[in-house]
Amino acid sequence: MQQVDLLILDEPTNHLDIEGISFLESFCQNRGKTLLCISHDKRFLNTVFDQVVEIADQQLYRYKGNYDDYLDQKIARYEQQMKQFGNQQKYLEQQEAFINRFRYKASKAAQVQSRIKMLDKMETIEAPEDMHTAKSIQIKRSERRLPATILTIVDAIVGYDTQYPLISLPAKLEVTKEMQIGIIGKNGVGKTTLISSILGQQILLS
């Protein structure tokens, strides 16, 4: 609404239809001023932004580029951190093995004490946070075989009033088990009402 130097957006693509998201992308791309945005929308981050800041391990990590660039750099940083962590763990094991072996040997007492002091002063490297934070979801497979046709709707309309229906369905609508259907449309045209009607939460008008 106003010409501002810094525009802060928090999940701006939530609840927008496709046209709304396209408008927002174009608006952000053509502003020519600073944007600061929180988003889980990968496409929006890829299209609009040229820097990504991630919060992880109670720190901020800054990456140049869009979301895809961030993923590549994050993998590289994770692999480097794992390498550093592994190298230090191996070194610590070697020093502790030496200390335990010669702890009570008089001729090695000075070396043992020196290594103990060195380990006490050493800054330990923490294992990096696991990149894959999403937990695997276990879905129990049904033993029952699905029928070829999952859903059949005949001569139905969707809405709250037969005089002003939201959606007029085809004379016969069949959904088979091989289908993967996406429902799109502007906000308010009846997408959720259609699903609610199919689930029996709304009445399918005839």
Image (cartoon, rainbow, N blue to C red):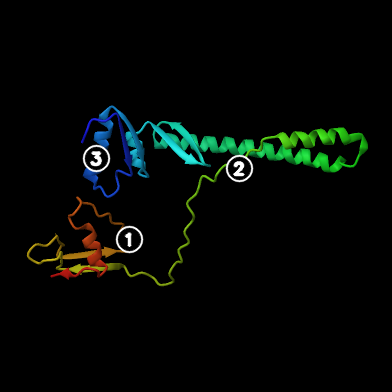
The answer to whether residue 2 is above or below residue 38 is above
Image-quadrant location for residue 155: bottom left
Viewer-nearest of discs 1 and 2 = 2
The location of residue 45, given as percent across then percent down, is: 35, 38
Q: Secondary structure at mark 2?
A: loop
Q: Secondary structure at mark 3?
A: helix
Q: Is residue 132 left or right of residue 182?
A: right
Looking at the image, which residue is at 48% across and 61% down? Answer: 138
Name which residue type carries label 3: Ser
Which residue has dot 1 on it? 178
Image-quadrant location for residue 206: bottom left
Name which residue type carries label 2: Ala
Looking at the image, which residue is at 41% across and 37% down? Answer: 68
Asked whether the beta carbons under mark 3 and mark 2 sit within 8 Å of each other, the answer is no
Viewer-nearest of discs 3 and 2 = 2
Give the spatial CA distance, label 1 vs label 2: 44 Å
Quadrant that contains the N terminus: top left
Viewer-nearest of discs 3 and 1 = 3
Which residue has dot 2 on it? 127
Name which residue type carries label 1: Glu
Image-quadrant location for residue 193: bottom left
Q: Nearer the viewer, residue 41 or 121?
A: 121
Mark 1: few/some/many CA within 10 Å (<14, 14-19, 20+): few
Q: Earlier in the sequence, mark 1 or mark 2?
A: 2
The answer to whether residue 110 is above or below residue 167 is above
Asked whether the beta carbons under mark 3 and mark 1 sit within 8 Å of each other, the answer is no
Outermost residue on the right side: it is 106
Q: Earlier in the sequence, mark 3 or mark 2?
A: 3
Mark 2: few/some/many CA within 10 Å (<14, 14-19, 20+): some
Which residue has dot 3 on it? 22
